[in-house]
Image (cartoon, grey):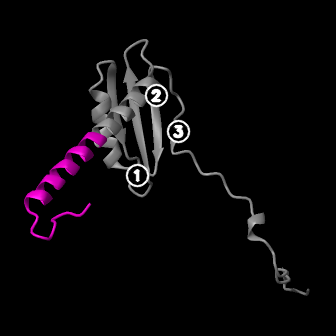
Amino acid sequence: MSQIDGDEEMADATPGAEVADIEAKPERQKLRLLPGSTDTAASFAFEREDHTLGNALRYMITKNPDVEFCGYSIPHPSEAVLHLRIQTWDGVSVYEVLRKGLDDLSDLCDAVQDKFTVSRDSFNTSHSSGTTLVDS
């Protein structure tokens, strides 16, 4: 190998060099607790989420009578991060409120999907002229 103007030439990789030797970087957490949080007031950051989850989750959490405040923001449009703030009345854990909100939202999505599937199948059965409007 020779050195030209401070740059050093590197030898080619040996045949059979394994790419698997490279250590994989751990994936970042999808949900983080932001600094300054307490048991009754906390802010969370959801990575790779936007208004679709933010507004639906805010609505579900706000319906909980133990919640004093719930809001969300997208700090900057070029960053795919959602900040969710939850404040509860004394003695109620924001972590339990968040878990209940996520569970309730999941149940709601399941109910909508089930109703859609039944309605689609009913429509396709009643209009069975060989073509369907929406395939399974």
Residue corresponding to mark 3: 32
Magenta segment's dominant SS is helix
Q: Looking at the image, which residue is at 22% across and 50% down?
A: 117
Quadrant (top left, top right, bottom left, bottom right) of the N terminus: bottom right
Identity of the amino acid at label 1? His
Residue nearer the viewer, 94 or 43: 94
The quarter of the picture where residue 86 lies is: top left
Q: Nearer the viewer, residue 70 or 128?
A: 128
Tell me where residue 51 appears, x and y as whole percent. Answer: 32, 48
The percent position of residue 44, horizontal first and vertical second, equals 46, 36
Secondary element under disc 3, as helix, strand or loop, is strand
The x, y position of residue 17, in whole percent, is 81, 75
Q: Position of residue 98 (x, y in %)?
A: 41, 30
The part of the chain drawn in magenta is 110-136
Reading the image, the residue beneath label 2 is 42
**Disc 1 marks which residue?**
76
Image quarter of residue 89: top left
- Picture layout, residue 100 above or below residue 106: above
Q: Is residue 116 left or right of residue 61?
A: left
As for residue 54 lying within the magenta part, the answer is: no
In primary-sequence order, the first of circles 1 and 3 is 3
